[in-house]
Image (cartoon, rainbow, N blue to C red):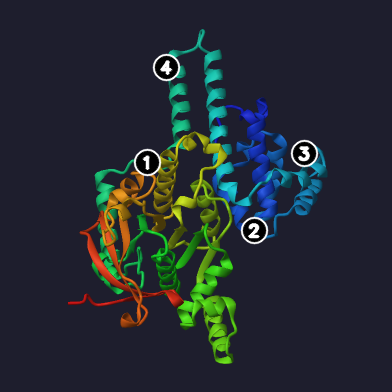
Amino acid sequence: MTRQYTTPHPAETQRPRRSERDSECAILGSVFLGEREHIEVAAGVLAPLDFLDVRNRVIFEAMLKIHHSGAPVDAMAVISELDREGALEKVSGPAYVTGLEQYVISPGNIIWHCKRVRDCAAEHKTAADLQAISADLSGGDHSTLIQRIKSAAEDLAAKTIPAPIASANDAARRVYESILAEIETPAHRVQTGIAGYDRKTGGMTAGDLIILAARPSVGKSALAGSIECAAAEDGRRVVLFSYEMSEDQIYRRHISRMTRIDLTKLVRGPLSMPEVALVKGALEEIAAQWEYHVYSGMDSDPEKMAGIVQALGTRGKVDLIVVDYLQLMGVDRANRRYSESRNIEIGYISRGLKQMARQFNCPVLALSQLSRDIEKRGKNSKPLLSDLRDSGSLEQDADQVLFLHRIRERCRETNWMDHVDLIVAKNRQGPGCTVPLGFFGQYMKWESREREG
């Protein structure tokens, strides 16, 4: 990535603010602590001259050289490269390089810091351009000054506007190509494994935010797990952000679903030898065939989540993102202005998830709780869009809203199966519908069922 500067870059004439320098150091430290994709993320967003602190700029240039050579980028490799070039004194010695890791709170935040450094560099560059123009106002040629102002404005727009506005001709051609591609293979739709839903809606569409909502203990996490399982078995790349369950709990549920061994037995034991063989076979299948990534940390801000997905995306396209669940998400301190009320906070989160769906061109399935208002209307009342908890932004931002509505609890008469309706209450790309399902809670298994007469 290269960027042309017509006037001296601010890194050569200005000192960065403390917060800007801290973000620069956090990026460099994240590269040391993270995997290879972190340097790829930074190199894709930033140029060396975007670093206002000259020490950080020199270190980033060394990192890029090491990365392009195919070697791993760590502190010792950077120190060795700087020493070879005679530039170690420019960065205040080895201690400064090895101390960069202390600025890192979470390596997954790197994309946020990259965007901040890029934006700050653009602001400083524009200020430097305007200052130079201001110095030439007296006695200068007005047409030349106007052109310089125009160039400065265009340069700033190029750094801050992510994509040009498409013409009707370009948009029409892309839509036509997309329709033709859909005839060949529905690559932009993820099949959920729920036959009735896939048949009536076509599956989950790339770029859509899909809300799956239910009251507690109806099975929304289990249904999301079934969808993840079906997508992974179909060769899709799946990322799960789980703020309710650990990685161990998630995989035990998948094993129970695949082997039909009671989940309680998988948790408490003991297992028979045939059951141990089934578990071993299921885990071998997951390890060999699934592209499945589970993140169960505490970084629940949409921008941090996007950074994690961005890092994974350097290894290949992500096909499905699942968030379990939305009410457990929060807002980072850097975005504290959105924390004035829970409604505002949820609105920020839902917009962030929608933006993430469009940024990575994949469906985002976000689980949500329903409010208690549904229980006040009666035991068998169907959910309404107004029952979505905390914010009307969920209904507004979502492309699809799905409800789980239990109509009969498990009993011997139904072979210990819950009868549950999957209600498509909102669908931007088609009509709503209801899909009858059965839920076997003992092994987290969902099945289609025929509507009873």
Distance between mark 4 and mark 1 Cα atoms: 27 Å
User: In terms of secondary structure, where does tag 4 sit?
Assistant: helix
Location of mark 2 (residue): 35
| Quadrant position of residue 211 | bottom left
Q: Residues within 10 Å of mark 4 (few under 14, many from 20)?
A: few
Q: Which amino acid type is marked by label 4?
A: Ser
Location of mark 3 (residue): 91
User: In terms of secondary structure, where does tag 1 sit?
Assistant: loop
Q: Which amino acid type is marked by label 1?
A: Pro
Foreground residue among 196 and 290 = 196
Q: Position of residue 299 (x, y in %)?
A: 56, 50
User: In terms of secondary structure, where does tag 3 sit?
Assistant: helix
* Contact flag, marks 2 and 3 (Cβ < 8 Å): no
Q: Position of residue 266 (x, y in %)?
A: 55, 78
* Contact flag, marks 4 and 1 (Cβ < 8 Å): no
State whether residue 2 appears in this view.
no
Q: Residues within 10 Å of mark 2 (few under 14, many from 20)?
A: some
Q: Position of residue 312 (x, y in %)?
A: 54, 59
Location of mark 1 (residue): 164
In percent of the image, x 79 and y 49: which residue is there? 79
Distance between mark 1 and mark 2 Cα atoms: 33 Å
Distance between mark 2 and mark 4 Cα atoms: 51 Å
**Mark 4, mark 1: which one is toward the viewer?**
1
Q: Earlier in the sequence, mark 1 or mark 2?
A: 2
